[in-house]
Image: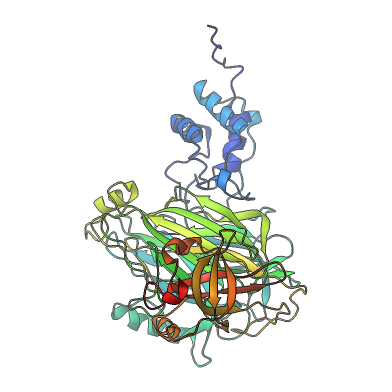
Amino acid sequence: MLLAAPPTMAEAPAFNKQVAPILYNHCVGCHRAGEVAAGVPLVSYEAAKSWAASIKVQVLKRTMPPWPADSAHSVKFSNDARLSQQDIDTLVAWVDAGGPKGNDSDLPPMPDFSQGWQHPRGRAPDVVVSLPEYSVAASGEVPYIQVRVVVPLARDRWITALQVRPGNSALVHHMAITEVAMADALRPEDLETLDRVAQQLGMASGAFATARPAVIDPENPASFDMLGVYTPGTTFETYGDGNAKLLKGGKNLYINFNVHYTATGKQEKDRSQLAFWFQPQPPQHQLYRVPAPGKTIIANGRQLLTDEPGTKAEGTDVAIPPISPYADNYELIGITAYTKPVTIYQFQPHAHLRGKYFRYDVVYPDGRELTVLTVPQYDFHWQLAYDLETPLKLPAGSKLVVTARYDNSLKNKDLTEMSAKDPARKCGPEKQAYFRNENQSWDEMFTPLIQYSIDSDDPVQAMPAAGQMQSRTTKALQIVKVVGCAARDPSGRWTLAQAGDPGVTQTQSTSLTELEAAKDEPFGKQEYQLLGAGPFNLEIHAGQKLAVKGVLIGDARLRGINVTSLQTVGALRSALCE
């Protein structure tokens, strides 16, 4: 048996010529002072060589650079961080050869991080907004900080790139940023006074200051368009040709920072910043960032009613039940349908320590289903945004379905490690985990964000006033509610048979009040194919009277409902459905 000879020093890759370019292009953005992976610096030969054995292990396991998505069961993303096999082979060969340095003349210039901004063309920001400096205690619960900074613009501007830069990445757990409009009578100093009173009462800052969205999601006027989101691994973003986000300018407009700090074991300070890059002309597509599938929520197989008691979870229309102690596979499914054609540009799943799995699926109005993102091992420490290589165009009548799973058991290493560091014992598998607003690390979140546009044949020309929707010419389909019987047609497809006339509704989910009213709804003679009804487990509903909501799809080939809600009405079985 012939064995290949180990590489000689002359044959082996050298740091300065072959290894440094890989580290500079893929690693040092995070592995340097002041960033989220500052504990493992890779900015010099000496630093990289001291971590050589770990580098080899991490790249062979493909855990670094972090890319939690399963690329075999996802669409392609333009920011795919995975190393090529050639780069992996180069790094492994360098480590195996003892980490030779090579000629100093071969060392490429280090990326310029002197200003801290990451625009790919080296452009300085057009505007930088700075938060006040905050001091965080060594331990204990850190209430959410809500601070509003006056928008420093007299007129509206179109954002083409944005960067959220934490001043101390060890402290900043995550940061959600919106633009809000305040009442004309309120001054910045009034907000500071109200914040101090709220904090003295143990409430979050901003609790007494009423604000309305400056820019709203036209598909859900109650929702803010999120300007920016910071999570570990996500800081700079640009939107591509023809796309931009709107920042309103004028009086009484504020950028609202909702900051979640976590104690590190020592007294520390933070002063975070937000940078904008603008373009002068209106874009072809205005982008909105929202927690998308929050209209209907299914928890462990049970669809939640909108009027069930409890605190509504952030980004949803329902109160999500807590995760029980030691539960290792708690499941949430979120569903939202689109009555207009939309284009999705980015996915960004967000959960806390118990989050272990995310999957985004699309159901088209012809019934086709497509998995667009699978994150089989969601990593709380690297919460990435996934930018689609080809934006996902969804015709009117499509819906997005997001499945998340949570592990609150002793098998969850991140959870047990956090519990061991938690002197108050608020975190650990023996505790229930709640979904609500302003969640702490020991709480949980179901926030599957997307960034999308609402398609129109016309570019945006006139800018709306703060809190108003841009006029769109695209004709919308309708969300309807209808009562009928769960049945299979001769081809084996699930249908709603003996269905009554559909009624138009403004909501995609269902309340207990609506279910009571549906008991008196008569059957009819219509039949609809039930599209994308898999999450509702129709097998157990055969022969039952159902109340169904969803997008009404109707043409010569198909008459159906892309289902967003499906509930049994009255008795489990109905004689009229036999």
In this view, 318 is above or below 62: below
Residue 521, x across and y down, in percent: 48, 85
Q: Is residue 303 visible?
A: yes
Q: Residue at x 39, y 75 (%)?
A: 312
Kindly give the residue lying farthest to the top in the view shown.
1
Residue 362, x across and y down, in percent: 58, 60
358 lies left or right of 323: right
Q: Looking at the picture, tell me which residue is in the foreground, 67 or 293.
A: 293
Q: Residue 139 falls in which quadrant of the image?
A: bottom left
276 lies left or right of 539: right
Q: Looking at the picture, tell me which residue is in the foreground, 345 or 122.
A: 345
Residue 373, x across and y down, in percent: 55, 53
Q: Residue 367 falls in which quadrant of the image?
A: bottom right
Question: In the picture, which quadrant includes the C terminus?
Answer: bottom left
Kindly give the residue lying farthest to the bottom in the view shown.
185
Residue 350, x across and y down, in percent: 46, 60
Q: Is residue 132 visible?
A: no
Q: Residue 136 falls in which quadrant of the image?
A: bottom left
In this view, 245 is above or below 9: below
In this view, 157 is above or below 188: above
Q: Residue at x 35, y 78 (%)?
A: 308
Q: Residue at x 61, y 18 (%)?
A: 11
558 lies left or right of 380: right
